[in-house]
Image (cartoon, rainbow, N blue to C red):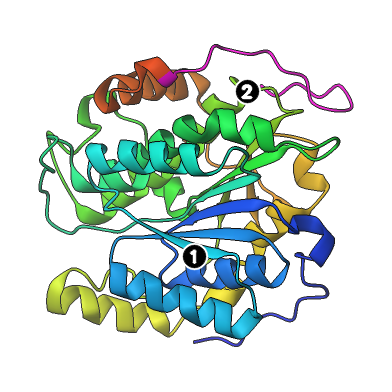
Amino acid sequence: MRADPVFKTDPLLPHALRDRTVVITGASDGIGRALSERCAHAGARVVMVGRNHAKTTHAANVVMNRTGSRTVSVEIADLLYLEEQHALGARLAAAHSSVFALVNNAGAIFLERALTRDGLERTFALNHVAYVSLALHLLPNLIAGALHHAPARIINVASRAHVRSRFDANNLQGEREYSGWSAYSQSKLANILFTRALARRVNASEVVVHALHPGLVASRFAANNGAFGRLQRRVMDWFSVSALAGSDTAAWLLASTEAAQESGAYWVRRERVEPSAAARDDHASELLWDRTIELAGLQQLNPAYSDAVLPGGVSAS
């Protein structure tokens, strides 16, 4: 594993998030756990979402012990399943009248194709549909969490892997042909397309939406795929950065004034970067939006299209 880069400043100064609610999925390990610790250290009310109760509770205890925070809570949900996505969204919306940030981070790769009980391919369900579902469930609470000159934030953890994918509406869930890595790359493309589509539907003075590439991060990613997956994980670890380094751009987007000046962008190492041409295809993003809303049963939460204008007169589209 490579050494961490030297950060000039920690992006999460105490004033940036103090007493603000931040919801982080995939928080029991890796980037999610590291980001939870940074947010707790900055005084945020952190909601750590994980699939495994014992593991997520242990991670929350570690975060509280290391930061001294007592405003860290745990929510358990298996985000593979629509029922649990909707139930989690409803619980969070009821428990937190205002939310300053949602970080959609939970994800996985599945080398073999299988469907959930909802009939969705697993990578598509977890890495994409769960992002959309939680964002729409919490959108009113995020709007309520916006402050003057500080819009609430939705941060979608995508990946540079999106550059290897092209949007194919006829093979959205690997119906015709399936490869685990291709499905993963398409899900990361979907994260960016979703980011752009949502940014066109929300007033950017209230909520901004961003996607990011965290780098190749040392974690248990891919280790769920048996002996071959564990071997791939060991190889990746030779080139990986730490979870702390991987959480840096997400932390910066939560706190920076730059992130409040635009919406729908893709970021790498705190810099705005143009994603692939496929990720900038707004016709594809609208097709994906409509298909996802239908498949996930989110029609009642679908926000109206908005030609919101950002501070400084920059169009959100």
Q: CA distance from mark 2 to mark 1?
A: 25 Å
Magenta segment: does it hold 124?
no
Q: Is residue 91 visible?
A: yes
Closer to the camera in the image, 159 or 150:
150
**In the image: residue 5, left or right of residue 87:** right
Q: Is residue 88 above or below residue 290?
A: below
What type is the residue that disc 1 sits on?
Gly
Q: Can I make out residue 190 in this image?
A: no
Res 30 quadrant in image? bottom left
Residue 302 inside the magenta-drawn segment:
yes
- Lower position in the chain sequence, tag 2 or tag 1: 1
Q: Secondary structure at mark 1?
A: helix
Q: Nearer the viewer, residue 273 or 310?
A: 310
- Residue at (36%, 44%) from the top-left corner? 88
State left or right for residue 280 relative to residue 260.
left
The answer to whether residue 103 is left or right of residue 57 is right
Can you give x and y, in whole percent of width and height, for residue 142 in the image? 61, 36
Q: Which residue is located at x 30 percent, y 53 percent? A: 77
In the picture of the structure, the residue carrying the numbered disc 1 is 32
- What range is drawn magenta here? 301-317
In the picture, residue 38 is in which quadrant? bottom right
Residue type for callout 2:
Val
Q: Alpha-carbon neighbours of circle 2 within 10 Å: few (<14), some, or many (≥20)?
A: many
| Residue contact at pointers 2 and 1, CB within 8 angstroms | no
| Coordinates of residue 74 in the picture (x, y in percent) | 43, 62
Q: Which mark is residue 277?
A: none
Viewer-nearest residue: 279 or 200: 200
The quarter of the displayed image where residue 199 is located: top right
**Residue drawn at (55%, 86%) of the image:** 2
Q: Which residue is mark 2?
A: 202
